[in-house]
Amino acid sequence: MNEAPARAESAPSPPAWRRIDLFAIAVRFQSVIGLVLVAIGGIIFSPRRHGLILFLAPDNMANIVRAVSETGIIAVGMTFVIITAGIDLSVGALLSLSSVLTATIMTTAGWGLIPTVLFVVACGAAFGAGLQVARGLALVISNNQYINISYGDGPGLAPPVFAILGDRLFNNIVPVATLVFVVVAAIATFVLNFTRFGRYVFAVGGNERAARLSGVPVTAVKISVYAITGLVSAIAGIVHAGQFNFGSANDGTGYELTAIAAVVIGGTSLFGGAGSMVGTVAGAVMLGALANVLQLNNINAALQLLATGAIIVLAAVLQSLVRRREGLGR
């Protein structure tokens, strides 16, 4: 009789497609996970009034999406820059310059809405990555004063149609500024994922030298992504002026930090070569919801800024861990 084998044969290792790195997946979808956790926390810690959870009140939800519209628009442009392993700290200054230009041109020069928007957006694209220049120019133009916007048909009055940026649609629920954010994000998603330029952006961020050797116009791509960021920052500045009915050289401070946080939380790698526009949108909404929860509980604004900075650091650490694990797995 044959003896049984001394030991069983070792089981074959599972195929590669079954080896799922749950940690990497969690990091990839961290913005969605974070948004869910913030929503749960908002419900739990929200103040109540007459039995109503204030966090879930329709007006509060509208305030959240309205508040994230400007930084969300900026974050869309910042996504392009960070995918190329760059960073742009001029976005807040460009928003202030754009709001000042918008208010000045309409109330002083008497331009109509469309010429004003086209001019301001063109200036934003031209001034991309020009932090000190943009802030300084805004201070000079405004004389460091608020430029108020009044509406009408006479001299010194802006076209009444511009006031729509401060309105809400669909039974006074959805802010117009949020619709602008959605449109900008949708266009950017298409450009990033379905055009040659989008492929070039990923290629430059993934390996600039290899991209150059493959014929990718690296310098042109880098200039273009900063121009895009300047352009969308100008759009955010126009929205800002329309929502608050003034332009100010001092507005937009700290917006760059919030935009970067939204992008990084959304899964875009600070090391370049990987990113998601949908993730950026989720990251922007998550930060807005978090800020709203803190405000409802009367948390100091300085702690809100600290929380945003801590989130950026945490997201960067998680990205580093994923890169290290991927490197060890090769």
Image: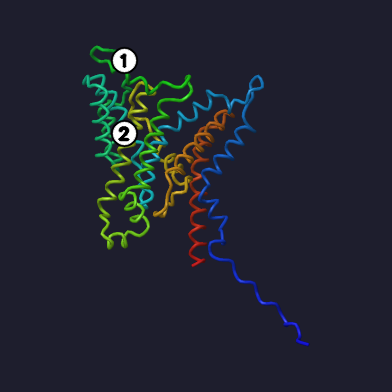
> How dense is the environment of label 1, judged by Cα within 10 Å: few (below 14), some, or many (20 and up)?
some
Q: Is residue 298 above or below residue 320?
A: above
Query: What's the colour scheme?
Result: rainbow
Compared across the picture, whether 188 is left or right of 170 comes to left
Compared across the picture, whether 301 is left or right of 163 comes to right
User: Which labelled disc corresponds to residue 18?
Assistant: none
Considering every residue shown, the one lying at the far front of the view is 1
Give percent across and percent down for residue 159.
28, 18
Q: Is residue 155 above or below residue 75?
A: above
Considering every residue shown, the one lying at the far right of the view is 1
| Mark 2 or mark 1: whose residue is earlier in sequence | 1
**Which image quadrant is residue 153 in?**
top left
Q: How many marks?
A: 2
Nearest the viewer among 135 and 62 is 62
Q: Amino acid at mark 2?
A: Ala
User: Which labelled disc corresponds to residue 234?
Assistant: 2
> How dense is the environment of label 2, judged by Cα within 10 Å: few (below 14), some, or many (20 and up)?
many
Considering every residue shown, the one lying at the far bottom of the view is 1
**Mark 1 = which residue?**
151
User: Dot 2 lies on which element?
Assistant: helix
- Residue pictured at 47% horizontal, 20% vertical: 172
Q: Amino acid at mark 1?
A: Tyr
Give percent across and percent down for residue 300.
54, 32
Quarter in which the N terminus is drawn: bottom right
Nearest the viewer among 10 and 48 is 10
Give percent across and percent down for residue 226.
30, 44
Q: Is residue 263 above or below residue 43?
A: below
Quote the CA–CA distance across marks 2 and 1: 21 Å
Compared across the picture, whether 318 is left or right of 129 comes to right
User: Dot 1 lies on which element?
Assistant: loop
Compared across the picture, whether 244 is left or right of 326 comes to left
